[in-house]
Amino acid sequence: MSNSINKYSESTQESLNYEIKILSNENRELRKLLENEIADKLSTSQALRYQHAKESALINSVPWLVFWVSSELFYLDANKFFTELLNTKLNSIIDKKVGTMNEDKELADSLLSFNNSTDTTRVEEIKIKHQSSYLYYLCIMHKNENLGHFSVVGIDISERKTINKLLNIKTKDLENILYVSSHDLKSPIQSITNLIKWLEEDLEDKLNNETKKLFSLMKNRITRMDNMLNSLLTYHSIEQKIYTISKFDIKKEITLLFNKHSQGHKQRELVFLSNAPIIETAGEALIYIFDVLISNSFKHNPLNKIIVEVLIEIQQDNYCFTFRDNGSGIPAEFQDKILEAFQTLKTKDEVEGCGMGLTIAKKIIERYHGIITINPIYDSGAEISFFWPIAPKI
């Protein structure tokens, strides 16, 4: 009996020792796993701290405002340029409500407006008071829906605005000088025209063919100068001119202009490739553009039969007018320049004109936020298109 008990005790002890050994091994493995996990977390924490330090260094090195705002309109983080603008420190701004940090009202209103909108990104110019003056920032706001906040990057454009203001003043001064000069030159040109006319009449019996050619050349040059001055005055007055909105019969007006320019051309054809509706628009402005395009189709066409094709399409909120002809076309080297002032495809002695027609047309189109383009691959003549608003605002 005693031997049985001893054997049982020894067996139990061995089992316990075995269990203890297994538990000890498991504990060592568990401790090792825990140590590895702690090491990984420490490594991750160090990496995150390092990453945050790099990001902080980066956002503090750029000369822009950078800050983050929660969807509840609390400041989450910011760089030194933003805190300096508010004349405070970072720890004083974190978790503070927008509008409670003495920030400029325009900034607070813009942040509130963006937060309440459905926009995910917005670019807005914001005027911010700084000490005794104002600074202007171009602010790019972007929402991060997953993280529930939005970021703001503000670029200081104060100096650029000042320069642009000075440039605008200089430009207006130059435009005024140009306008006054062009206007004042009209009178002496008219006087010179009259003097030449009187001289020609008084010397009519004494002029030989060569002298008559010289008089004709002088009159031609004066007429060209007068046309150039008229074009400059027209170009200057586009921004100030008020165009009346009224019913405008596209087909009728284009046909009248085509017939005007086709006088003396026995073979000519006007083709409408689409419907030409009656619309409500600034007809006077549109007539000028049509007139320039049709006039150029005749000026730069050496063929006996002149063909002009017109296509009118609706694209979103605009009419797209396309004019094609079977003329000489526009060489590739001129396609970037032809819309600039005083640019002509041929010398002014070959084709009468001062090179301002398309320039004025372009300015009228751009006033109505449209664009004019030249088809670079059209090789059967010239193809010019422009967009015109369906509902123009004067």
Image (spheres, rainbow, N blue to C red):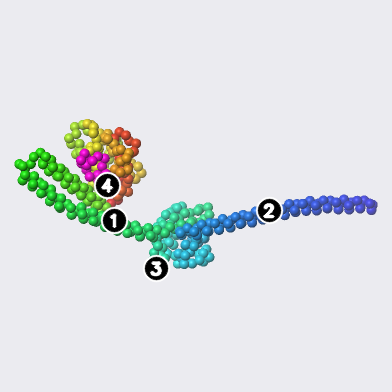
Location of residue 207 in the rendering, given as x and y in whole percent from the top left corner: 7, 41
Contact between labelled residues 4 and 2, with CB atoms less than 8 Å apart: no
| Mark 2 lies on residue | 36
Q: Residues within 10 Å of mark 1 (few under 14, many from 20)?
A: few
- Magenta segment includes 248: no
- Give the secondary structure at mark 2: helix
Q: CA distance from mark 1 to mark 4?
A: 16 Å
| Mark 3 lies on residue | 132
The disc, 2 or 1, on the residue closer to the chain's N-terminal end is 2
User: Residue 309 falls in which quadrant of the image?
Assistant: top left
Left or right of 45: which side holds 360? left
Q: Amino acid at mark 2?
A: Asn
Contact between labelled residues 3 and 4, with CB atoms less than 8 Å apart: no
Q: Which residues are magenta?
A: 339-363
| Mark 4 lies on residue | 341
Q: In the image, which is nearer the foreground, mark 4 or mark 3? A: 4
Q: In the image, which is nearer the foreground, mark 2 or mark 4? A: 4
Location of residue 338 in the rendering, given as x and y in whole percent from the top left corner: 29, 43
Q: Nearer the viewer, residue 55 or 98?
A: 55
In this rendering, the answer to whether 321 lies above or below 133 is above
The disc, 2 or 4, on the residue closer to the chain's N-terminal end is 2
Q: CA distance from mark 1 to mark 3?
A: 30 Å
Location of residue 189 in the rendering, given as x and y in whole percent from the top left corner: 15, 50
Left or right of 192: which side holds 291? right
Left or right of 312: which side holds 132? right
| Mark 1 lies on residue | 171
